[in-house]
Image: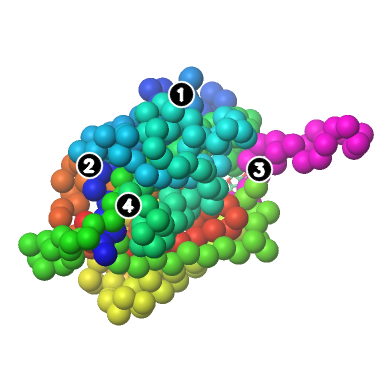
Amino acid sequence: MTIRITGTGSALPEKIVTNFDLQKLVETSDEWIQKRTGIAQRRVSTGETVASLAAGACTKALEMAGKAAEEVDLILVATCSPELLLPCCACQVQDRIGASHAAAFDLNAACAGFLFALNTAQAYLQSGIYKNALIVGSEVLSKLVDWTDRGTCILFGDGAGAAFVEAQAEDFVCENGRKSGVECMVQGADGARGMVLSCAERTLNSAFFSESQDGNLFVQMDGQEVYKFATKQVPACIQQALGQMGIAVDDVDWFLLHQANVRIIESVAKHLKADLAKFPMNIQDVGNMSSATIPVLLDACCRSGKIKRGDRIVLSGFGAGLTYGASVLVW
Ligand code: COA
């Protein structure tokens, strides 16, 4: 059985916030941000929500796949910034798009969330439990960021990306002879180093615990530790995935990496001895949208025709947790 992505979609908030806008909020400069991260601007919600962006992305993915919402079996939303703890975002998406027959739940693997959703969907589909799934990465990180902290507020943006994944009984063989579909996946976590990138929620009950719980509720990050983790772990897990397949870096047409920092992407390309031209990027325009970065980039590359049928793609990312993963697929 083949598991294929047959539709992609994305949705971004209207408002663009440039580095020059941030210069008015914190002591920083467009030059510093561009040089250290590659980011020039990002989208920031002025009302759009994790659920509304996710639903917008899902509608477009279904359109591309030529499917009706009632046909969806499973909705998986990867997010670390939902509006509500209950109900989960996936149930809100189910309601918004009218996918009345779908099971729905959220998962949180931070910026690697879309990869974890893809892997989870693949497991459901391969086991025969479901025939298809809508998988989504959706974030409104702007509400988790301290806009007086120049070390973090310059990095993040809001947005959502979705993919429709289907189990297909018959192989779809591309013109170049490759079989379209997900080929292999690797995922992992290093919880022992989790506090290098964190964001707190309410921790204890207020009825029986009287001490003040007013801590910092914004994103806290040790940027250099995250950088070290990413530049080591991402190439390692890509190599592991390619090793499982018995294929080489040269057999891959495109590497779609989590868009956290251009320097991290350049370092991964160097580690893999791969041509940087094989690493499409959109970080300059949208910043780091956590779980949404990979599906938004995938959607842009597919719609622009950059990625073609039969191309082999590696999706790989890392995030708070610390989590990491890689998926190899033929488009
Ligand atoms: N504007 C101007 N100066 C800034 C700044 C900003 N926005 N943020 C930090 N600085 C300053 C620091 O205060 C420091 O000043 P000092 O030398 O006087 O002490 C200097 O710039 C260097 O800071 P440093 O933290 O060493 O910079 P860096 O090269 O490590 O870059 C990051 C910082 C955050 C861009 C980088 O560490 C990074 O990208 N890490 C990975 C983060 C990530 O990807 N997170 C998301 C994971 S999903």
- Other residues around mark 4 within 10 Å, as few (<14) / some (14–19) / many (≥20): many
Per the image, label 2 sits on a secondary structure element best described as helix
Tell me the mark number nearer the camera, choosing from 1 and 3: 1
Q: Residue at x 34, y 73 (%)?
A: 242
Residue 48: assigned label? 1
Q: Nearer the viewer, mark 4 or mark 1?
A: 4
Say which residue label 4 marks: 131
Q: Quadrant of residue 153?
A: top right
Residue 329: x and y in percent read 28, 62
In the rendering, at what x and y percent does residue 16 appear?
A: 40, 25
Closer to viewer: mark 4 or mark 3 = 4
* Marks 1 and 3, how far apart at CA: 21 Å
Q: Which residue is mark 3?
A: 199
Please, what is the three-letter code of the amino acid marked with disc 2?
A: Ala
Closer to us: 30 or 43: 43
The residues bearing labels 4 and 1 have C-alpha atoms spaced at a distance of 31 Å
Q: Nearer the viewer, residue 56 or 16?
A: 56
Badge 2: how crowded within 10 Å, few (<14), some, or many (20+)? some
Rendering quarter of residue 70: top left
Q: Earlier in the sequence, mark 4 or mark 2?
A: 2
Of pointers 1 and 2, the one earlier in the residue sequence:
1
Asked if one can make out residue 39 in the rendered structure from this viewpoint, the answer is no
Q: Residue at x 48, y 20 (%)?
A: 47
Residue at mark 2: C-beta within 8 A of ligand 1: no
